[in-house]
Amino acid sequence: MMTAKAGPSGEPAELSDRQHLSRIGIIWLVLSVVCMALVYFAWGPHMPPGTDSVQAKGQQFDNTVLATVATPVILFIWVYLAYVLINWRVRADTPVAELRDGPAIRGNLRFQATWMIVTGATVLSMFIFGTYELVKDSGSGTGSGQAPIWTPAGYSVDASQNKLLVVQAIGQQWRWTFRYPQFGGIETSQLVIPAGQEIQYSVTSLDVIHSFWATNLGIKADANPGVNNIAFGQATKIGPIDIRCAELCGVWHGAMYATGQVVSRNDFQTWIAAEQYAHKDLITFLPPYADFYLPQSDGGFYDPSANPLPNPPGPTPATSPTVIP
Amino acid sequence: MTQIDDSKAQLGLPRSGRLALVTGVLVVVGAALAFTFAYLISYPSTVVAAATASDTVVLQSVGAIGLGNHPTWVSYMAQENGNWVHSTVLTVPANSDVHFKIYQYDSGSPLRNPYMDQVAGTVGGTETLNGQVVRIVNDNADGGIGHTFAIPSLGVYVPMPGISSLQTNACSTPVPCATTFDHNTVEFTIHTGAPGTFTWQCFVPCGLGFLIGNGGPMSTFGYMGGYLKVVA
Protein backbone atom coordinates (compact mmCIF):
# COMPACT_ATOMS: atom_id res chain seq x y z
CA MET A 1 0.00 0.00 0.00
CA MET A 2 1.37 3.35 -0.96
CA THR A 3 1.56 6.03 1.66
CA ALA A 4 1.70 9.77 1.22
CA LYS A 5 4.80 11.71 2.17
CA ALA A 6 4.50 14.08 5.11
CA GLY A 7 4.21 17.71 4.25
CA PRO A 8 6.19 20.55 5.81
CA SER A 9 3.56 21.03 8.53
CA GLY A 10 3.51 17.36 9.44
CA GLU A 11 0.20 16.61 7.72
CA PRO A 12 0.15 13.87 5.10
CA ALA A 13 0.59 15.24 1.60
CA GLU A 14 -1.98 14.47 -1.08
CA LEU A 15 -1.21 11.61 -3.41
CA SER A 16 -0.58 12.40 -7.04
CA ASP A 17 -3.00 11.21 -9.70
CA ARG A 18 -0.51 8.58 -10.77
CA GLN A 19 -0.28 7.27 -7.21
CA HIS A 20 -4.06 7.06 -6.97
CA LEU A 21 -4.15 5.21 -10.27
CA SER A 22 -1.51 2.78 -9.06
CA ARG A 23 -3.49 2.08 -5.91
CA ILE A 24 -6.66 1.43 -7.90
CA GLY A 25 -4.75 -0.75 -10.33
CA ILE A 26 -3.19 -2.92 -7.61
CA ILE A 27 -6.47 -3.42 -5.75
CA TRP A 28 -8.24 -4.24 -9.02
CA LEU A 29 -5.53 -6.64 -10.15
CA VAL A 30 -5.46 -8.63 -6.91
CA LEU A 31 -9.26 -8.88 -6.75
CA SER A 32 -9.46 -9.82 -10.43
CA VAL A 33 -6.98 -12.66 -10.17
CA VAL A 34 -8.78 -14.11 -7.15
CA CYS A 35 -12.30 -13.64 -8.50
CA MET A 36 -11.52 -14.85 -12.02
CA ALA A 37 -10.11 -18.07 -10.59
CA LEU A 38 -13.20 -18.48 -8.43
CA VAL A 39 -15.56 -17.82 -11.34
CA TYR A 40 -13.78 -20.18 -13.71
CA PHE A 41 -12.99 -23.07 -11.41
CA ALA A 42 -15.63 -22.88 -8.66
CA TRP A 43 -18.71 -21.36 -10.33
CA GLY A 44 -18.12 -22.46 -13.91
CA PRO A 45 -18.82 -26.19 -13.50
CA HIS A 46 -22.18 -25.35 -11.96
CA MET A 47 -23.34 -22.88 -14.57
CA PRO A 48 -26.40 -23.60 -16.72
CA PRO A 49 -27.35 -25.41 -18.83
CA GLY A 50 -25.23 -28.20 -17.37
CA THR A 51 -23.54 -31.06 -19.16
CA ASP A 52 -26.40 -33.28 -20.36
CA SER A 53 -25.48 -32.84 -24.03
CA VAL A 54 -22.60 -31.78 -26.24
CA GLN A 55 -24.36 -28.47 -26.83
CA ALA A 56 -25.14 -27.90 -23.15
CA LYS A 57 -21.54 -28.57 -22.22
CA GLY A 58 -20.36 -26.16 -24.89
CA GLN A 59 -22.74 -23.48 -23.66
CA GLN A 60 -21.62 -24.01 -20.09
CA PHE A 61 -18.02 -23.48 -21.21
CA ASP A 62 -19.08 -20.35 -23.10
CA ASN A 63 -20.90 -18.98 -20.08
CA THR A 64 -17.89 -19.71 -17.91
CA VAL A 65 -15.51 -17.93 -20.28
CA LEU A 66 -17.83 -14.93 -20.66
CA ALA A 67 -18.33 -14.64 -16.91
CA THR A 68 -14.58 -14.89 -16.36
CA VAL A 69 -13.89 -12.18 -18.91
CA ALA A 70 -16.65 -9.98 -17.48
CA THR A 71 -15.31 -10.32 -13.94
CA PRO A 72 -12.38 -7.85 -14.20
CA VAL A 73 -14.58 -5.40 -16.10
CA ILE A 74 -17.20 -5.41 -13.36
CA LEU A 75 -14.53 -5.31 -10.68
CA PHE A 76 -12.87 -2.30 -12.28
CA ILE A 77 -16.15 -0.39 -12.08
CA TRP A 78 -16.78 -1.40 -8.48
CA VAL A 79 -13.22 -0.78 -7.30
CA TYR A 80 -13.06 2.58 -9.01
CA LEU A 81 -16.46 3.59 -7.62
CA ALA A 82 -15.54 2.54 -4.11
CA TYR A 83 -12.18 4.28 -4.31
CA VAL A 84 -13.76 7.49 -5.52
CA LEU A 85 -16.43 7.44 -2.82
CA ILE A 86 -13.87 6.89 -0.09
CA ASN A 87 -11.09 9.21 -1.22
CA TRP A 88 -12.68 11.98 -3.21
CA ARG A 89 -15.94 12.44 -1.46
CA VAL A 90 -16.60 16.12 -0.83
CA ARG A 91 -17.19 16.70 2.83
CA ALA A 92 -19.67 19.20 4.17
CA ASP A 93 -16.94 21.44 5.58
CA THR A 94 -14.88 21.57 2.38
CA PRO A 95 -14.56 25.18 1.22
CA VAL A 96 -15.83 25.71 -2.28
CA ALA A 97 -12.54 27.30 -3.23
CA GLU A 98 -10.73 24.03 -2.56
CA LEU A 99 -12.90 21.94 -4.83
CA ARG A 100 -11.12 20.80 -7.97
CA ASP A 101 -11.91 18.53 -10.83
CA GLY A 102 -9.94 15.44 -11.74
CA PRO A 103 -7.53 15.27 -14.66
CA ALA A 104 -9.17 15.73 -18.02
CA ILE A 105 -9.64 12.67 -20.19
CA ARG A 106 -10.19 14.74 -23.27
CA GLY A 107 -6.93 15.26 -25.04
CA ASN A 108 -5.20 12.54 -23.04
CA LEU A 109 -4.06 10.46 -25.95
CA ARG A 110 -2.41 7.79 -23.85
CA PHE A 111 -5.50 7.17 -21.78
CA GLN A 112 -7.80 7.17 -24.78
CA ALA A 113 -5.57 4.80 -26.75
CA THR A 114 -5.36 2.39 -23.82
CA TRP A 115 -9.11 2.49 -23.36
CA MET A 116 -9.86 1.83 -27.01
CA ILE A 117 -7.27 -0.92 -27.39
CA VAL A 118 -8.38 -2.79 -24.27
CA THR A 119 -12.12 -2.54 -24.97
CA GLY A 120 -11.68 -3.16 -28.69
CA ALA A 121 -9.54 -6.22 -28.12
CA THR A 122 -11.98 -7.57 -25.56
CA VAL A 123 -15.01 -7.22 -27.80
CA LEU A 124 -13.17 -8.51 -30.87
CA SER A 125 -11.84 -11.56 -29.06
CA MET A 126 -15.36 -12.31 -27.79
CA PHE A 127 -16.66 -12.04 -31.33
CA ILE A 128 -14.05 -14.50 -32.62
CA PHE A 129 -14.55 -16.83 -29.67
CA GLY A 130 -18.35 -16.75 -30.00
CA THR A 131 -18.28 -17.40 -33.73
CA TYR A 132 -15.88 -20.30 -33.31
CA GLU A 133 -18.05 -21.82 -30.60
CA LEU A 134 -21.18 -21.40 -32.71
CA VAL A 135 -19.65 -23.14 -35.72
CA LYS A 136 -17.88 -25.87 -33.76
CA ASP A 137 -21.08 -27.48 -32.45
CA SER A 138 -23.16 -27.07 -35.63
CA GLY A 139 -25.00 -24.02 -34.41
CA SER A 140 -24.48 -24.83 -30.76
CA GLY A 141 -28.05 -26.04 -30.32
CA THR A 142 -29.72 -22.98 -31.77
CA GLY A 143 -32.34 -22.87 -34.49
CA SER A 144 -30.51 -22.30 -37.77
CA GLY A 145 -33.42 -21.88 -40.14
CA GLN A 146 -34.60 -24.12 -42.94
CA ALA A 147 -31.18 -24.37 -44.58
CA PRO A 148 -28.59 -24.53 -41.83
CA ILE A 149 -25.04 -23.58 -42.79
CA TRP A 150 -23.15 -25.46 -40.09
CA THR A 151 -24.31 -29.04 -40.13
CA PRO A 152 -23.04 -32.17 -38.37
CA ALA A 153 -21.69 -35.22 -40.17
CA GLY A 154 -24.46 -37.37 -41.60
CA TYR A 155 -26.87 -34.52 -42.26
CA SER A 156 -28.45 -34.26 -45.65
CA VAL A 157 -31.25 -32.12 -47.01
CA ASP A 158 -32.38 -35.24 -48.84
CA ALA A 159 -34.43 -37.13 -46.26
CA SER A 160 -33.47 -40.49 -47.74
CA GLN A 161 -29.77 -39.71 -47.28
CA ASN A 162 -30.07 -38.06 -43.88
CA LYS A 163 -28.44 -40.22 -41.23
CA LEU A 164 -29.57 -38.10 -38.27
CA LEU A 165 -32.58 -39.01 -36.17
CA VAL A 166 -35.22 -36.42 -37.04
CA VAL A 167 -37.63 -35.24 -34.37
CA GLN A 168 -40.20 -32.65 -35.25
CA ALA A 169 -41.19 -30.41 -32.34
CA ILE A 170 -44.64 -28.92 -32.97
CA GLY A 171 -45.80 -26.00 -30.88
CA GLN A 172 -49.38 -24.87 -30.56
CA GLN A 173 -51.21 -22.82 -28.01
CA TRP A 174 -50.37 -24.27 -25.50
CA ARG A 175 -48.57 -27.57 -25.73
CA TRP A 176 -45.74 -29.39 -27.48
CA THR A 177 -46.01 -32.61 -29.45
CA PHE A 178 -43.30 -34.53 -31.29
CA ARG A 179 -43.30 -36.43 -34.57
CA TYR A 180 -40.82 -39.04 -35.71
CA PRO A 181 -40.87 -39.12 -39.54
CA GLN A 182 -38.48 -42.06 -39.73
CA PHE A 183 -40.90 -44.16 -37.69
CA GLY A 184 -44.06 -43.75 -39.70
CA GLY A 185 -44.61 -40.17 -38.65
CA ILE A 186 -46.02 -41.08 -35.25
CA GLU A 187 -46.75 -38.24 -32.90
CA THR A 188 -46.13 -38.31 -29.16
CA SER A 189 -46.58 -36.00 -26.23
CA GLN A 190 -43.15 -36.78 -24.79
CA LEU A 191 -39.75 -36.17 -26.33
CA VAL A 192 -37.73 -39.36 -26.10
CA ILE A 193 -34.30 -39.55 -27.73
CA PRO A 194 -31.37 -41.94 -27.56
CA ALA A 195 -28.11 -40.87 -25.92
CA GLY A 196 -25.09 -40.54 -28.17
CA GLN A 197 -27.17 -40.03 -31.31
CA GLU A 198 -27.05 -36.83 -33.33
CA ILE A 199 -30.59 -35.45 -33.43
CA GLN A 200 -32.09 -33.08 -35.97
CA TYR A 201 -34.78 -31.02 -34.27
CA SER A 202 -37.19 -29.67 -36.87
CA VAL A 203 -39.18 -27.03 -35.04
CA THR A 204 -42.42 -25.53 -36.26
CA SER A 205 -45.67 -24.06 -35.00
CA LEU A 206 -49.33 -24.47 -35.87
CA ASP A 207 -50.38 -21.01 -34.79
CA VAL A 208 -48.28 -18.22 -33.27
CA ILE A 209 -44.56 -17.93 -32.58
CA HIS A 210 -43.35 -20.24 -29.85
CA SER A 211 -39.81 -21.20 -28.91
CA PHE A 212 -38.78 -24.77 -28.30
CA TRP A 213 -36.35 -24.82 -25.40
CA ALA A 214 -35.02 -28.11 -24.09
CA THR A 215 -33.35 -26.36 -21.19
CA ASN A 216 -30.95 -29.01 -19.94
CA LEU A 217 -29.97 -30.07 -23.46
CA GLY A 218 -29.09 -26.54 -24.54
CA ILE A 219 -31.44 -26.72 -27.52
CA LYS A 220 -33.38 -23.58 -28.32
CA ALA A 221 -35.15 -22.82 -31.58
CA ASP A 222 -38.02 -20.51 -32.43
CA ALA A 223 -41.17 -22.29 -33.58
CA ASN A 224 -42.65 -20.19 -36.38
CA PRO A 225 -45.82 -21.08 -38.27
CA GLY A 226 -45.01 -22.08 -41.83
CA VAL A 227 -41.31 -22.50 -41.11
CA ASN A 228 -39.09 -25.51 -40.48
CA ASN A 229 -36.44 -24.25 -38.06
CA ILE A 230 -33.65 -26.81 -37.71
CA ALA A 231 -31.36 -27.28 -34.71
CA PHE A 232 -28.89 -30.05 -34.00
CA GLY A 233 -27.98 -31.71 -30.74
CA GLN A 234 -26.51 -34.79 -29.18
CA ALA A 235 -27.49 -35.82 -25.66
CA THR A 236 -24.75 -37.50 -23.69
CA LYS A 237 -26.41 -38.40 -20.40
CA ILE A 238 -29.40 -40.61 -19.77
CA GLY A 239 -32.02 -38.73 -17.79
CA PRO A 240 -35.02 -36.41 -17.95
CA ILE A 241 -35.53 -33.56 -20.41
CA ASP A 242 -37.18 -30.33 -19.39
CA ILE A 243 -38.93 -28.47 -22.21
CA ARG A 244 -40.33 -24.96 -22.02
CA CYS A 245 -41.75 -22.40 -24.38
CA ALA A 246 -39.36 -19.46 -24.41
CA GLU A 247 -41.55 -17.06 -26.38
CA LEU A 248 -44.47 -15.25 -24.78
CA CYS A 249 -47.31 -16.86 -26.70
CA GLY A 250 -50.56 -16.10 -24.90
CA VAL A 251 -52.51 -16.61 -21.73
CA TRP A 252 -51.22 -20.10 -20.92
CA HIS A 253 -47.64 -19.52 -22.05
CA GLY A 254 -46.43 -20.18 -18.53
CA ALA A 255 -48.06 -23.62 -18.58
CA MET A 256 -46.65 -24.59 -21.97
CA TYR A 257 -44.06 -27.14 -21.00
CA ALA A 258 -43.36 -30.75 -21.76
CA THR A 259 -41.14 -33.48 -20.46
CA GLY A 260 -38.96 -36.06 -22.08
CA GLN A 261 -36.30 -38.62 -21.52
CA VAL A 262 -32.86 -39.41 -22.84
CA VAL A 263 -32.58 -43.18 -22.97
CA SER A 264 -30.18 -45.79 -24.26
CA ARG A 265 -30.40 -46.78 -27.93
CA ASN A 266 -31.98 -50.11 -27.05
CA ASP A 267 -34.54 -48.48 -24.79
CA PHE A 268 -35.35 -46.01 -27.52
CA GLN A 269 -36.07 -48.79 -29.99
CA THR A 270 -38.32 -50.46 -27.43
CA TRP A 271 -40.13 -47.22 -26.68
CA ILE A 272 -40.68 -46.21 -30.29
CA ALA A 273 -42.02 -49.66 -31.12
CA ALA A 274 -44.46 -49.43 -28.22
CA GLU A 275 -45.56 -45.96 -29.33
CA GLN A 276 -46.10 -47.12 -32.89
CA TYR A 277 -48.30 -49.92 -31.62
CA ALA A 278 -50.19 -47.66 -29.22
CA HIS A 279 -50.89 -45.13 -31.99
CA LYS A 280 -51.54 -47.56 -34.82
CA ASP A 281 -55.15 -46.42 -35.11
CA LEU A 282 -54.46 -42.74 -34.58
CA ILE A 283 -51.79 -42.57 -37.29
CA THR A 284 -54.42 -42.82 -40.00
CA PHE A 285 -55.99 -39.61 -38.74
CA LEU A 286 -52.78 -37.61 -38.79
CA PRO A 287 -51.76 -35.70 -41.90
CA PRO A 288 -48.66 -36.98 -43.69
CA TYR A 289 -45.44 -35.73 -42.19
CA ALA A 290 -44.50 -32.33 -43.54
CA ASP A 291 -41.81 -29.76 -42.82
CA PHE A 292 -44.55 -27.46 -41.54
CA TYR A 293 -48.31 -27.21 -41.51
CA LEU A 294 -50.68 -24.40 -42.27
CA PRO A 295 -54.07 -23.80 -40.69
CA GLN A 296 -57.03 -23.82 -43.01
CA SER A 297 -59.70 -21.19 -43.14
CA ASP A 298 -62.24 -23.31 -41.28
CA GLY A 299 -60.35 -22.66 -38.09
CA GLY A 300 -58.76 -26.04 -37.70
CA PHE A 301 -56.74 -28.82 -39.30
CA TYR A 302 -53.39 -28.35 -40.87
CA ASP A 303 -52.91 -28.68 -44.51
CA PRO A 304 -50.59 -31.43 -45.79
CA SER A 305 -50.58 -29.77 -49.19
CA ALA A 306 -48.19 -27.25 -47.71
CA ASN A 307 -45.61 -29.99 -47.78
CA PRO A 308 -43.40 -29.78 -50.85
CA LEU A 309 -42.22 -33.37 -50.35
CA PRO A 310 -44.09 -36.33 -51.84
CA ASN A 311 -46.19 -38.10 -49.25
CA PRO A 312 -48.80 -40.80 -49.18
CA PRO A 313 -52.36 -39.49 -49.19
CA GLY A 314 -53.93 -38.59 -45.89
CA PRO A 315 -57.20 -39.83 -44.45
CA THR A 316 -60.32 -39.23 -46.45
CA PRO A 317 -63.15 -37.96 -44.28
CA ALA A 318 -65.85 -39.72 -46.24
CA THR A 319 -64.49 -43.16 -45.50
CA SER A 320 -62.94 -42.62 -42.10
CA PRO A 321 -64.86 -43.89 -39.11
CA THR A 322 -66.45 -41.35 -36.81
CA VAL A 323 -65.06 -42.93 -33.70
CA ILE A 324 -62.84 -45.86 -32.82
CA PRO A 325 -63.90 -47.81 -29.78
CA MET B 1 -33.01 23.80 5.74
CA THR B 2 -32.54 26.86 3.60
CA GLN B 3 -33.64 24.95 0.54
CA ILE B 4 -36.82 23.76 2.26
CA ASP B 5 -37.69 27.29 3.19
CA ASP B 6 -37.18 28.33 -0.43
CA SER B 7 -39.45 25.54 -1.57
CA LYS B 8 -42.07 26.60 0.92
CA ALA B 9 -41.91 30.11 -0.37
CA GLN B 10 -42.35 28.94 -3.95
CA LEU B 11 -45.35 26.74 -3.17
CA GLY B 12 -46.95 29.37 -1.05
CA LEU B 13 -48.55 26.70 1.13
CA PRO B 14 -48.38 26.30 4.88
CA ARG B 15 -47.08 23.01 6.28
CA SER B 16 -50.63 21.68 6.87
CA GLY B 17 -51.57 22.48 3.29
CA ARG B 18 -48.58 20.66 1.89
CA LEU B 19 -49.33 17.69 4.12
CA ALA B 20 -52.91 17.57 2.87
CA LEU B 21 -51.74 17.84 -0.73
CA VAL B 22 -49.25 14.99 -0.36
CA THR B 23 -51.83 12.87 1.47
CA GLY B 24 -54.38 13.50 -1.26
CA VAL B 25 -51.96 12.50 -4.00
CA LEU B 26 -51.00 9.34 -2.12
CA VAL B 27 -54.64 8.39 -1.63
CA VAL B 28 -55.44 8.86 -5.33
CA VAL B 29 -52.36 6.92 -6.48
CA GLY B 30 -53.04 4.18 -3.90
CA ALA B 31 -56.66 3.86 -5.00
CA ALA B 32 -55.64 3.64 -8.64
CA LEU B 33 -53.07 0.96 -7.88
CA ALA B 34 -55.53 -1.00 -5.73
CA PHE B 35 -58.18 -0.86 -8.45
CA THR B 36 -55.72 -1.96 -11.12
CA PHE B 37 -54.35 -4.76 -8.98
CA ALA B 38 -57.84 -5.96 -8.02
CA TYR B 39 -58.82 -5.96 -11.69
CA LEU B 40 -55.76 -7.92 -12.69
CA ILE B 41 -56.20 -10.63 -10.09
CA SER B 42 -59.97 -10.95 -10.39
CA TYR B 43 -61.26 -14.18 -11.85
CA PRO B 44 -64.44 -16.22 -11.74
CA SER B 45 -65.72 -17.65 -8.51
CA THR B 46 -64.56 -21.10 -7.52
CA VAL B 47 -67.13 -23.81 -8.09
CA VAL B 48 -67.10 -26.87 -5.87
CA ALA B 49 -67.67 -29.15 -8.84
CA ALA B 50 -67.17 -32.34 -6.86
CA ALA B 51 -67.04 -32.25 -3.09
CA THR B 52 -66.41 -35.98 -2.78
CA ALA B 53 -65.19 -38.74 -5.06
CA SER B 54 -68.75 -39.96 -5.52
CA ASP B 55 -69.85 -36.62 -6.98
CA THR B 56 -69.85 -36.04 -10.73
CA VAL B 57 -68.43 -32.90 -12.26
CA VAL B 58 -71.12 -31.64 -14.61
CA LEU B 59 -70.23 -29.06 -17.25
CA GLN B 60 -71.73 -27.76 -20.46
CA SER B 61 -70.07 -25.99 -23.35
CA VAL B 62 -72.21 -23.50 -25.18
CA GLY B 63 -71.73 -21.57 -28.41
CA ALA B 64 -72.58 -18.22 -26.84
CA ILE B 65 -72.72 -17.57 -23.15
CA GLY B 66 -75.32 -14.84 -23.49
CA LEU B 67 -74.32 -12.92 -20.40
CA GLY B 68 -71.54 -10.80 -18.93
CA ASN B 69 -69.15 -8.60 -20.86
CA HIS B 70 -68.94 -10.94 -23.84
CA PRO B 71 -72.34 -12.52 -24.41
CA THR B 72 -71.42 -13.81 -27.87
CA TRP B 73 -68.35 -15.72 -26.71
CA VAL B 74 -68.20 -19.47 -26.50
CA SER B 75 -67.82 -20.68 -22.94
CA TYR B 76 -68.21 -23.37 -20.33
CA MET B 77 -70.68 -23.48 -17.47
CA ALA B 78 -70.29 -25.61 -14.36
CA GLN B 79 -72.86 -27.12 -12.04
CA GLU B 80 -72.67 -26.58 -8.30
CA ASN B 81 -75.28 -28.15 -6.08
CA GLY B 82 -77.53 -28.56 -9.10
CA ASN B 83 -77.23 -24.91 -10.14
CA TRP B 84 -75.44 -23.74 -13.27
CA VAL B 85 -72.67 -21.20 -12.71
CA HIS B 86 -70.61 -19.35 -15.30
CA SER B 87 -67.17 -20.28 -14.05
CA THR B 88 -64.16 -22.30 -15.12
CA VAL B 89 -62.53 -22.61 -11.70
CA LEU B 90 -63.42 -26.06 -10.48
CA THR B 91 -62.65 -27.79 -7.20
CA VAL B 92 -62.33 -31.57 -7.08
CA PRO B 93 -61.04 -33.95 -4.40
CA ALA B 94 -57.44 -35.19 -4.40
CA ASN B 95 -56.37 -38.82 -4.81
CA SER B 96 -59.74 -39.83 -6.19
CA ASP B 97 -61.35 -41.10 -9.36
CA VAL B 98 -63.36 -38.05 -10.39
CA HIS B 99 -66.10 -38.55 -12.96
CA PHE B 100 -66.89 -35.83 -15.48
CA LYS B 101 -70.05 -35.40 -17.52
CA ILE B 102 -70.00 -32.70 -20.16
CA TYR B 103 -72.93 -31.64 -22.31
CA GLN B 104 -71.50 -30.28 -25.55
CA TYR B 105 -73.96 -27.97 -27.34
CA ASP B 106 -71.57 -26.20 -29.70
CA SER B 107 -70.80 -26.95 -33.33
CA GLY B 108 -67.29 -28.03 -34.28
CA SER B 109 -64.48 -28.01 -36.79
CA PRO B 110 -61.45 -30.15 -37.60
CA LEU B 111 -58.69 -29.98 -35.01
CA ARG B 112 -55.59 -28.01 -35.79
CA ASN B 113 -53.64 -31.03 -34.62
CA PRO B 114 -55.54 -34.32 -35.11
CA TYR B 115 -53.19 -35.93 -32.61
CA MET B 116 -55.78 -34.87 -30.07
CA ASP B 117 -58.40 -37.06 -31.73
CA GLN B 118 -57.19 -39.66 -29.28
CA VAL B 119 -58.43 -39.67 -25.72
CA ALA B 120 -55.58 -39.49 -23.24
CA GLY B 121 -55.11 -39.33 -19.50
CA THR B 122 -58.50 -40.73 -18.54
CA VAL B 123 -59.07 -43.95 -16.64
CA GLY B 124 -58.82 -46.67 -19.31
CA GLY B 125 -57.78 -44.14 -21.93
CA THR B 126 -61.37 -43.82 -23.10
CA GLU B 127 -64.37 -41.53 -22.99
CA THR B 128 -68.03 -42.40 -23.25
CA LEU B 129 -69.62 -40.56 -26.15
CA ASN B 130 -73.41 -40.66 -26.09
CA GLY B 131 -73.21 -44.00 -24.31
CA GLN B 132 -70.49 -45.52 -26.52
CA VAL B 133 -67.01 -46.10 -25.15
CA VAL B 134 -64.44 -44.71 -27.60
CA ARG B 135 -60.70 -44.13 -27.78
CA ILE B 136 -60.53 -41.93 -30.87
CA VAL B 137 -62.92 -39.37 -32.30
CA ASN B 138 -62.43 -38.43 -35.94
CA ASP B 139 -62.14 -34.66 -36.13
CA ASN B 140 -62.81 -34.84 -39.86
CA ALA B 141 -66.18 -36.48 -39.42
CA ASP B 142 -69.46 -34.63 -39.72
CA GLY B 143 -69.57 -32.31 -36.71
CA GLY B 144 -65.80 -32.12 -36.25
CA ILE B 145 -64.62 -31.46 -32.73
CA GLY B 146 -66.53 -28.83 -30.80
CA HIS B 147 -64.05 -28.51 -27.97
CA THR B 148 -61.46 -30.50 -26.11
CA PHE B 149 -61.36 -30.70 -22.36
CA ALA B 150 -57.65 -30.80 -21.66
CA ILE B 151 -55.53 -30.60 -18.53
CA PRO B 152 -52.06 -30.61 -20.12
CA SER B 153 -50.05 -30.94 -16.93
CA LEU B 154 -52.03 -34.06 -16.02
CA GLY B 155 -51.88 -35.43 -19.56
CA VAL B 156 -55.67 -35.33 -19.90
CA TYR B 157 -57.07 -34.74 -23.41
CA VAL B 158 -60.72 -35.44 -24.15
CA PRO B 159 -62.14 -34.57 -27.59
CA MET B 160 -65.81 -33.62 -27.63
CA PRO B 161 -67.53 -33.77 -31.03
CA GLY B 162 -69.48 -30.83 -32.30
CA ILE B 163 -73.16 -31.24 -32.92
CA SER B 164 -74.04 -32.48 -36.37
CA SER B 165 -74.20 -30.06 -39.26
CA LEU B 166 -77.66 -31.53 -39.90
CA GLN B 167 -78.93 -30.42 -36.51
CA THR B 168 -82.17 -28.47 -36.45
CA ASN B 169 -82.51 -27.85 -32.76
CA ALA B 170 -79.39 -26.03 -31.68
CA CYS B 171 -79.31 -24.28 -28.34
CA SER B 172 -79.13 -20.52 -28.37
CA THR B 173 -79.06 -18.08 -25.51
CA PRO B 174 -80.13 -17.80 -22.79
CA VAL B 175 -77.95 -20.38 -21.12
CA PRO B 176 -77.85 -22.85 -19.51
CA CYS B 177 -78.97 -25.07 -22.35
CA ALA B 178 -81.56 -27.72 -21.64
CA THR B 179 -80.89 -31.29 -22.67
CA THR B 180 -83.80 -31.07 -25.08
CA PHE B 181 -81.50 -29.21 -27.46
CA ASP B 182 -79.10 -31.05 -29.77
CA HIS B 183 -75.96 -31.99 -27.92
CA ASN B 184 -73.34 -34.66 -27.38
CA THR B 185 -72.79 -36.11 -23.94
CA VAL B 186 -69.21 -36.93 -23.07
CA GLU B 187 -68.28 -38.76 -19.90
CA PHE B 188 -64.91 -39.78 -18.56
CA THR B 189 -63.06 -40.36 -15.32
CA ILE B 190 -59.68 -39.03 -14.28
CA HIS B 191 -57.64 -39.99 -11.28
CA THR B 192 -56.52 -36.95 -9.33
CA GLY B 193 -53.26 -37.18 -7.50
CA ALA B 194 -51.82 -34.86 -4.90
CA PRO B 195 -53.45 -31.51 -4.23
CA GLY B 196 -52.54 -28.72 -6.58
CA THR B 197 -53.88 -26.22 -9.07
CA PHE B 198 -53.81 -27.20 -12.72
CA THR B 199 -54.75 -25.20 -15.78
CA TRP B 200 -57.26 -26.65 -18.18
CA GLN B 201 -58.15 -25.42 -21.62
CA CYS B 202 -59.71 -26.12 -25.01
CA PHE B 203 -57.47 -26.93 -27.96
CA VAL B 204 -59.99 -26.21 -30.68
CA PRO B 205 -59.36 -22.71 -32.07
CA CYS B 206 -62.92 -21.72 -31.27
CA GLY B 207 -62.46 -17.99 -30.79
CA LEU B 208 -64.32 -17.07 -33.94
CA GLY B 209 -63.44 -13.68 -35.34
CA PHE B 210 -60.07 -13.59 -33.63
CA LEU B 211 -56.62 -14.15 -35.05
CA ILE B 212 -56.22 -17.86 -35.89
CA GLY B 213 -59.17 -18.58 -33.62
CA ASN B 214 -57.15 -18.38 -30.44
CA GLY B 215 -58.06 -14.90 -29.23
CA GLY B 216 -61.11 -13.73 -27.31
CA PRO B 217 -62.64 -16.58 -25.34
CA MET B 218 -59.57 -18.77 -25.93
CA SER B 219 -57.29 -16.19 -24.39
CA THR B 220 -59.55 -14.79 -21.70
CA PHE B 221 -59.70 -16.54 -18.40
CA GLY B 222 -63.15 -17.85 -17.52
CA TYR B 223 -64.39 -18.82 -20.96
CA MET B 224 -62.50 -21.71 -22.61
CA GLY B 225 -59.97 -22.34 -19.91
CA GLY B 226 -59.59 -22.22 -16.20
CA TYR B 227 -58.15 -23.87 -13.13
CA LEU B 228 -58.79 -27.31 -11.77
CA LYS B 229 -58.16 -27.03 -8.05
CA VAL B 230 -57.42 -30.43 -6.60
CA VAL B 231 -57.93 -30.16 -2.85
CA ALA B 232 -57.30 -32.53 0.02
Image (cartoon, grey):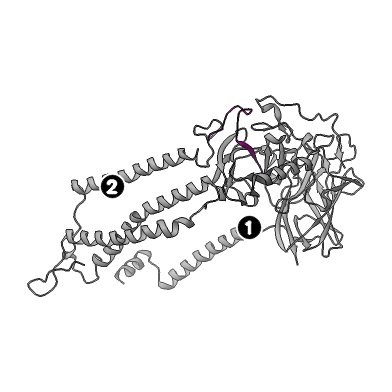
Look at the numbered discs 2 and 1 and tell me whether their residues touch, using CB distance below 8 Å: no
Residue name at image x 32 percent, y 70 percent: B5
Question: Between tags 2 and 1, which lies in front?
Answer: 2
Front residue of A137 and A259:
A137
Relative image position of residue B121 (x, y in whole percent): 77, 51
Residue name at image x 65 percent, y 38 percent: A207
Relative image position of residue A86 (x, y in whole percent): 27, 67
Residue type of the residue flagged with mark 2: Val
Residue name at image x 34 percent, y 66 percent: B7
Instruction: Tell me, yes or no, if residue A175 can be seen here.
Output: no
Q: Which residues are magenta?
A: A152-172
Residue B33 position (above or below residue A186):
below
Residue B220 position (above or below residue A281):
below
The residue to which callout 2 is attached is: A118
Quadrant in which the N terminus of chain A is drawn = bottom left
Residue B211 position (above or below residue B96):
above
Residue type of the residue flagged with mark 1: Tyr
| Mark 2 burial class by Cα count in 10 Å: few <14, some 14-19, many 20+ | few
